[in-house]
Image (tube, rainbow, N blue to C red):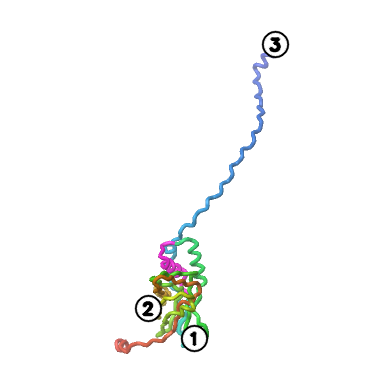
Amino acid sequence: MATSKRQLDSKTPAEPKTATSKKKPAAKKPAAKKPATKKAEPVKIVSTQEPTKIAEPQVSAEKLEYPFVCNFEKVSNYTFKNSIIKLLNAEEVSEATESAIEASYNDIKLPTRLSPGTSEYHFLFPLPELIIQPGVTVAIPTGIKCFLARNWNLEIVAEDYTATLGSDIGASLIPPVQIVNPDDYGTDTEGQIYITFSNTNKDTPITITKDAAFAKGILRMFGLAYNEKMKEA
């Protein structure tokens, strides 16, 4: 029996029609947000640094022969940083302050004489600036240590403040003569020299600026009491 065209069409599955859809315009990407600027967080120098490792003297004791009886050296970066933090009376400092301390350390100048015929070694202030309020006494770290020959010490006395600190007056060292001994070298603080400075004014602050000669050191020989010889005998 002949199959009608209509039957064939019903048996044969119709091919799916492909829908032709129009392309939608691409969605605009949201503008990228700029990252928020983070504030500099404090840096805890004391807790993040390694313990101090005492360095060997740059010059051996055997090479210190009169008239060369001492050698000035810089303390370690670690010791200087921590002494400045204590001076600031802070447990932590900002990154900017840390960078300033680092720059001050790198620019520390060893004490020098003004001419070959003088005995005073002038200490230059290592920080950008320090303002000492009236009635305040401050122990200023110099970043310097001194390796001394046997039976020699370094006496630190006041500078001529009218020349070094401008018109500021009423400044004094406490005590007036500060002694650095050979045994000071190699201690836990590396023998860093501190100069205790006091403002005795009633109402006038004292400002010390960078590289101001704020104290001077004089090398002196010291003797021993005969009693010590008797104890050793």
Task: Identify the element where label 2 is drawn.
Answer: loop
* Mark closer to the chain start, 3 or 1: 3
| Picture mark count | 3
Q: Which mark is residue 5?
A: none
The residue nearer to you, when weighing 16 against 121, is: 121
* Mark closer to the chain start, 1 or 2: 1
| Above or below, comparing residue 204 to residue 225 in the picture | above
Using the numbered discs, state the Cα–Cα distance from disc 2 to disc 3 in whole angstroms: 132 Å
**Tag 2: residue type?**
Pro
Mark 2: give few (<14), some (14-19) or many (20+) Cα within 10 Å.
Answer: some
Residue at x-position 50% and y-position 62%: 96
| Above or below, comparing residue 34 to residue 117 in the picture | above
Q: Residue 72: where, in percent of width, then height?
A: 47, 79
Q: Which mark is residue 175?
A: 2
Residue 191 visible, this angle: no
Residue at x-position 47% and y-position 75%: 167
Residue on which the image places disc 1: 118
Using the numbered discs, state the Cα–Cα distance from disc 1 to disc 2 in whole angstroms: 23 Å
Residue 29 covered by magenta stretch: no
Would you identify the image quadrant in which residue 229 lies? Answer: bottom left
Judged by depth in the image, the label closer to the viewer, 2 or 3, is 2
Query: Which image quadrant: the N terminus?
Result: top right
The range drawn in magenta is 74-92
Would you identify the image quadrant in which residue 159 lies? Answer: bottom left
Q: Residue 102: where, in percent of width, then height?
A: 50, 67
Q: Which mark is residue 2?
A: 3
Task: Identify the element where label 1 is drawn.
Answer: loop
Q: Residue 43: where, in percent of width, then height?
A: 46, 60
Q: Residue 46: where, in percent of width, then height?
A: 42, 64
Residue at x-position 46% and y-position 82%: 70
**Tag 3: residue type?**
Ala
